[in-house]
Amino acid sequence: MAAMVLEQQQVLAAARQRFAEGGALMDSVVSPPVQRSWERSRQAGVQPRQEPYYAPLAAAATRLDDPADRRLARCVREDMDHLWAAFGGRQWTLFCVNAEGLVIAQREHGLADVPVLRPIQIGRRLREIDIGTTAPACSLAEDAPALVRGNEHYLDRFATVFCLSVPLHGLDGEVLGALDITGTGERDAELLHGYFRQAALSAENRLMQDHRPCHLLAVQHDTRWLHSPLQGLLAIEEDGQVRAANRVARRLFGLPRRGHLPVLTLDGLFAGASTHQRRRLLQSGPAHRVRLDDDTAVHVQYLRGPLAPHASLKLDAPRANAAPASLRTHTTQHVRDAVAAHQGNVSAAARQLGISRTTLYKLIRA
């Protein structure tokens, strides 16, 4: 097996060198996305035998000036921690780039010093015109997961590197960046793809939840997938217009994969539902089944209402000696505000208010 891999890598290196010198490339040598990346690298004048070029980092490079970069970095942080705990190591680095290839978040082993990984730092831009083909570059260009192993990279310097990446999408399905793991060992690529895809969906859901001026609905055919990375999310304006839908929701409702959504109202999206079902769409409570047409239905849960632009998501904790609140203490709006502040987490809102979940539901429906 090892001999077969070595032979394949040697074939790749020879084909890449001939290609860099102007020769043609057989379609079966590398995947089409990698081939297109090789073509871009060659057009940029990159040569396989050159050393990668990294622009010097400014003194304050680790400070992200763009609010969009800070938001994306915040939304991927938790999932990067989980991925690093599962797949990190001394010979590996895990990072997130924005749409221009700028590293905005990273996890690495504090005691490792791997020369080929050392330049990957927050604030550095990883571009094909400087370092040739990489998985993040392929993901950003192709809007698809990418795997680049060994001599599939355009530079000889990366002949020992394993690189896997998945794209991250914004409210309109646009590519915002990519999540990548890079190292000098081997990993199960199929397993990694599954975990990284889930992490990308989870980070994108956080971006949706950060869209504060809208009502937020969770939708799925199977209730077990609600409150998971596989839930569909809909952002609804106060006038009932659908402002945004995540990737899962776009598939569930047959909406365009990317780009601005067509003019669409919540009632139009659920045109097959009964009047009672449509009335409940923006009401707090447990997930309920809503018919889309004669053959299909989804489960819908109202997560939260619009939030003030700079409202804090944290509520003051109850005092240790405070008595439990009575029903008269909380107005319906007060309870809904608490649920919204906890992003639809009914249990957390009930604990904060000092009432039971049952009482909370009664107050919401009052």
Image: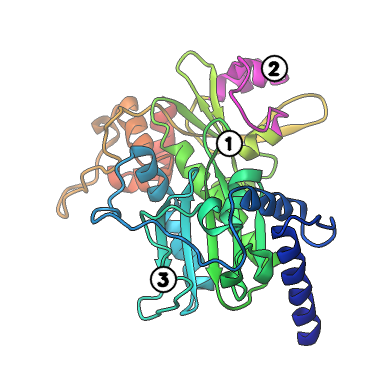
Q: Are marks 1 and 2 in contact (CB under 8 Å)?
A: no
Does residue 16 show up? yes
- Label 1 belongs to which residue? 246
**SS for callout 3:** loop
Q: Earlier in the sequence, mark 1 or mark 2?
A: 1
Residue that label 2 marks: 271
Nearer the N terminus, badge 3 or badge 2?
A: 3
Does the magenta portion include 251? Answer: no
* Distance CA(mark 3)–CA(mark 2): 55 Å
Q: Disc 3 residue type?
A: Arg
| Quadrant occupied by the C terminus | top left
Query: Which image quarter: residue 339?
Result: top left
* Image colouring: rainbow
Q: Residue at x 74, y 75 (%)?
A: 9
How many neighbours does mark 1 have within 10 angstroms: few (below 14), some (14-19), or many (20 or more)? many
Question: Which residue is more in the foreground, 118 or 143?
Answer: 118
- Which residue is the site of mark 3? 118
